[in-house]
Amino acid sequence: MLDDKKAIRAWMMYDWANSAFATTIMAAVMPIYYAGVAAGGLEDGRATSYWGFTQTAAAIVIAVLSPLLGGDRRPLGRQKTVSRFFSRCLARRRASAWRLSAKATGSRLRPSSSSA
């Protein structure tokens, strides 16, 4: 019984932290990043419409895939496999966002050269 309470509390804390993180990124950080980097060369109206289109497409993909992936994971015991797959997808997405940002700003990731 104690393990169940620990597991429930752990999931509650994870959900609380993840919700705050996702809300902050989606509402505050991502639109500024998108406007400044990804849509930097577009006029305001077109950039805004592209932002809406991408958010709509993402919502549709999530609405379609969530029941399939969420319902399919537990009975087949594939939690780790599915989690690894989506973790790798997230890492690739973040790396591509960094590359896009670095390309737009002309910066490169270089080791600092300090002379001793």
Image (cartoon, grey):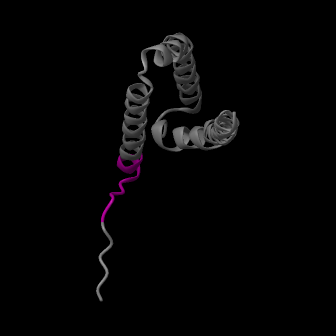
Expressed as whole percent of the image width and height from the top left, the position of residue 44 reads 58, 32
Residue at the spot x=50%, y=14% of the render?
65
- Which residues are the magenta region? 101-110
The front one of 76 and 19 is 76
Expressed as whole percent of the image width and height from the top left, the position of residue 30 reads 57, 39
| Residue 106 included in the magenta stretch of the image | yes
Expressed as whole percent of the image width and height from the top left, the position of residue 57 reads 52, 17
In which quadrant of the rendered image does the C terminus lie? Answer: bottom left
In which quadrant of the rendered image does the N terminus lie? Answer: top right
The front one of 64 and 26 is 64
| Residue 84 included in the magenta stretch of the image | no
Residue at the spot x=49%, y=11% of the render?
68
Residue at the spot x=59%, y=28% of the render?
48
Residue 85 placement, left or right of 39: left
Expressed as whole percent of the image width and height from the top left, the position of residue 12 reads 69, 36
Q: How many dots with numbers?
A: 0
Task: Specify the quadrant of the image occupied by residue 16.
Answer: top right
The front one of 12 and 47 is 12
Reply above or below: 19 against 76. Answer: below
Residue 13 placement, left or right of 95: right
The front one of 57 and 78 is 78
Reply above or below: 106 against 71. Answer: below
